[in-house]
Image (cartoon, rainbow, N blue to C red):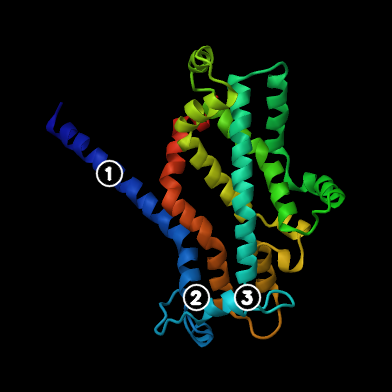
Amino acid sequence: MSERDMSLHRHTPRLGRLVIYTILILAAVFYLTPLYVIVITSIKSLQAIHLGNLLSIPLHPTLQPWREAWSSACSGATCQGVQVYFWNSVHLVIPAVLISTAFGAVNGYVLTQWRFRGSDLFFTLLLIGTFIPFQMVLLPMAWVLGKIHLQNSIAGLVMVHVIYGLAFTTLFFRNFYITIPRELVKAAMIDGAGFFTIFWRIMLPVSTPIFMVTIIWQFTQIWNDFLFGVVFTSGAIHPITVALNNLVNTSTGVRRYNVDMAAALIAALPTLLVYLIAGKYFVRGLTAGSVKG
């Protein structure tokens, strides 16, 4: 190899890394610029917004827009901020995530380790549920909620999200549990272990990665949902996504962009925190077999 070829060989990896880092930096700037604008706008006064540049850093930052967004901003006809709706979403997302995840774990366990006649057909039908759009279940869900008197309630909205999320949670756990050797379960059965003993002592201890994936997935889907919230609830029962839409579209008085941005950040904070704290577990869970099978 000539000296020129060796020099070219040394410089090619550096050029490749430079191109990769440049693309990554541009992508980061592209995706983070809207977040930057939202954050700095939320701590600007209304006067500074009207006189300043959209990207300028506030000279006199203030948290007053956050206080207004939380406790006194008008959402529709009421002016009590987004705090009531924020806690509605908390009361919605916790039971919905826990129940759908628990049922998904048991379903996945049964479909892989305790297979029954027609289990493949059952799983196929359940899999179809992952492709059904939200709009197709609105009328059946509304009919069922009316029949059991759970319309316009957080409990009814929890039930809707649990039913709709079961197909996804079952798929996640089924694809994870199918990687666990069936001989392990058979050996436990020979030793006298029953259905729930095997589940608690063998399956659950190795299920942390897929639990993290499912919880993060369900939390994000349910917290950010707008359609189910606006269809199945009204008034003070709305989740925060619907309240945020009403707040932004309230047209009385001067448009308070700083309050709107603060409310948007309040609505987004839980999902941002979940991904910042547990994002690495989400990636580990996916690579641990949750998308196999």
Mark 1 or mark 3, which is nearer to you?
A: 3
Considering every residue shown, the one lying at the far top of the view is 190
Q: Foreground: 199 or 124?
A: 199
Q: Regarding mark 1 in the picture, which secondary structure is present there?
A: helix
Q: Foreground: 231 or 52?
A: 231
Mark 2 or mark 1, which is nearer to you?
A: 2
User: What residue would you read off at disc 2?
Assistant: 41
Q: What x and y, as percent, mark residue 110?
A: 62, 24
Identify the amino acid type marked 2.
Answer: Thr
Considering every residue shown, the one lying at the far left of the view is 3
Q: What x and y, as percent, mark residue 207?
A: 48, 33
Mark 3 or mark 2, which is nearer to you?
A: 3
Identify the amino acid type marked 1.
Answer: Leu
In terms of sequence position, does the residue under pointer 3 or pointer 2 come before the other? 2
Residue plotted at (57% across, 64% down): 267
User: What residue would you read off at disc 1?
Assistant: 15
Q: Residues within 10 Å of mark 2 (few under 14, many from 20)?
A: many
User: What residue would you read off at disc 3?
Assistant: 81
Residue plotted at (73% across, 18% down): 118
In terms of sequence position, does the residue under pointer 1 or pointer 3 come before the other? 1
Q: Regarding mark 3 in the picture, which secondary structure is present there?
A: loop
Examine the rendering and report whether any part of residue 257 can be seen.
Answer: no
